[in-house]
Image (cartoon, grey):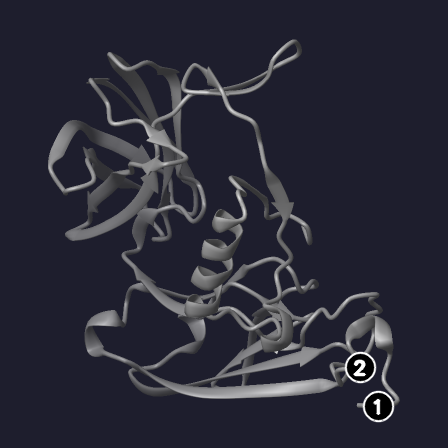
Amino acid sequence: EPRGDANTGKLPWKGVGWYRKSFEVSGGEIGKRLFLDFDGVMASPEVYVNGAKAGGWDYGYLGFRVDATPFVKRGANVVAVRADTRHIHSRWYPGAGIYRKVVKTVCEPVHVAHQKTYVTTPEVSAASARVAVASAIRNDTGRPAVADVTVTLKDGVGATVAEEKIGRLSVAPGDETPVAAAFSLASPKLWDVDAPNLYTAKIVVRAAGGEDAETIRFGIRSFAFLPEDGFHLNGRRVQLQGVNLHSDLGPLGMAFNASAMRRQLALMKEMGANALRTSHNC
């Protein structure tokens, strides 16, 4: 747009946009909880399922969840998303519309609560590490539930390195009950800038004849900012060579592209970068 605002690349990003997509709901999914998870919609999205407003979000740079359970039916369904950027102002190109992935998430009525799982490594050395897993179990039924929970840790090749079973966990209807597990690992494979070793923690909940699970990846490492010596990783000083990474991909715009991001990260690593500031828009 030659007459557009140069601060936003003269791109025609202001307006109202609609998206519509059909999706199937199987017979086995009826009676479960069905959520639509949006990673990013610019801006102020409104979400409709089969013509009824199911939810929305009053922002553009954060993900959000819509509970579509009351609005779906067996067979064909339609989700419609309205995005409106007319009321926002920007000195950079903020994008417009759906610019990150959308996922249909199906859970059992008793399930791992959304965004409640955290993994921390409060004690780390080359000889041993302590891993703490915290989460919560949610009961979306109309009656009390008793859940059996198992937390399993696996290494980078999928081998189980630790497991804890938590049985007879009571969860009130419409409520969440916290759950925690702690593990001690011998000779952990530490995460480092040139050795990005990862583990996974899997939480499995069994209740009311159903099974739900969540898996999260994490690295075991220690870090500290020391006033006299700067940043330390796994007990040694590391000089941070950082960049402020914006959410767009230059001329490709705001929509995420895995190949372009891999290229971007590879170029920055060749330049010597070992740190990213990724929260610019939050």
Q: Which residue is mark 2?
A: 10
Residues at discs 1 and 2 in contact (Cβ within 8 Å): yes
Picture residue at 81% right of the left edge, 70% below the top? 88
Picture residue at 63% right of the left edge, 70% below the top? 250
Q: Which mark is residue 2?
A: 1
Whole-Å distance between the Cαs marked 1 and 2?
Answer: 7 Å
Q: Nearer the viewer, residue 69 or 281?
A: 281
Q: Position of residue 6 (x, y in %)?
A: 85, 76
Picture residue at 75% right of the left edge, 76% below the top? 85
Image-quadrant location for residue 134: top left
Q: Relative to 92, is 277 on the left or the right?
A: left
**Residue type for callout 1:** Pro
- Answer few, some or many: residues within 10 Å of disc 1's Cα (few below 14, many 20 plus, some between 14 and 19): few
Residue 179 visible, this angle: no
Is residue 49 depicted above or below 224 in this figure?
below
Image-quadrant location for residue 165: top left
**Residue type for callout 2:** Lys
User: Mark 2: which secondary structure?
Assistant: loop
Q: Nearer the viewer, residue 218 or 249?
A: 249
